[in-house]
Image (tube, rainbow, N blue to C red):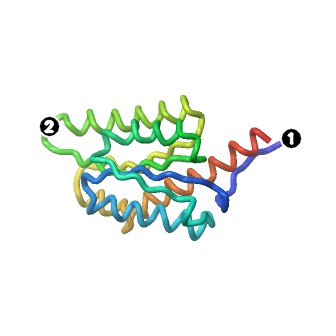
Amino acid sequence: MKVIEGVVAAPNARVAITIARFNSFINDSLLQGAVDALKRIGQVADDNITVVWVPGAYELPLTARVLANSGNYDAVIALGTVIRGGTAHFEYVAGEASSGLGHVALDCQIPVTFGVLTTENIEQAIERAGTKAGNKGAEAALTALEMINVIKAINA
């Protein structure tokens, strides 16, 4: 029986991070977590990490697609925060970001990880950006690295 299981060390990985400026007070922590995980745990060289800032979470899928189609990256990490408010805006933005990023991964056949917080309030976002609930940016980075290695193993 052959079992394929990914590891997170990927020193030669080329990784793009697309991150939303909107809610940057939270997203900055997600970015710090992602970069730390890539460099410290994944052993990815600083020169192999590209960060692309976009206005908000809604713009993440298009940017991820352009990055994926460039052929310059082994994975794309999408980071952002959508906090529920009093209107339907949350559903539209969170839903389109999630759906769009999923389509990019399937269409482009490279890992596109979802580090977009979708929370009810600011407190939940803070918890998921490095306090009680860990750092979802770091988790998205580790997932990207593992998926790079899984796909390489499948194609070997």
Q: Secondary structure at mark 2?
A: loop
Count numbered badges in the picture. 2
Q: 13 and 4: which one is in front? A: 13
- On screen, residue 129 versus residue 108, left or right, reads left
Quarter of the view holding residue 133: bottom left
N-terminal-most mark, 1 or 2:
1
Q: Answer few, some or many: residues within 10 Å of disc 2's Cα (few below 14, many 20 plus, some between 14 and 19).
A: few
> Residue beneath label 2, please?
87
Residue for point 60% across, 67% down:
41
Q: 143 and 76: which one is in front? A: 76
Residue for point 75% across, 40% down:
154
Q: Secondary structure at mark 1?
A: loop
In this rendering, is residue 154 above or below 42?
Answer: above
Residue for point 44% across, 37% down:
101
- On screen, residue 12 versus residue 21, left or right, reads right
Q: Which mark is residue 1?
A: 1
Name the front one of labels 1 and 2: 2
Which amino acid lies under the numbered mark 1 shown in the image of this protein? Met
Q: 101 and 49: which one is in front? A: 49
- Structural distance between the alpha carbons of marks 1 and 2: 52 Å
Expressed as whole percent of the image width and height from the top left, the position of residue 58 reads 31, 39
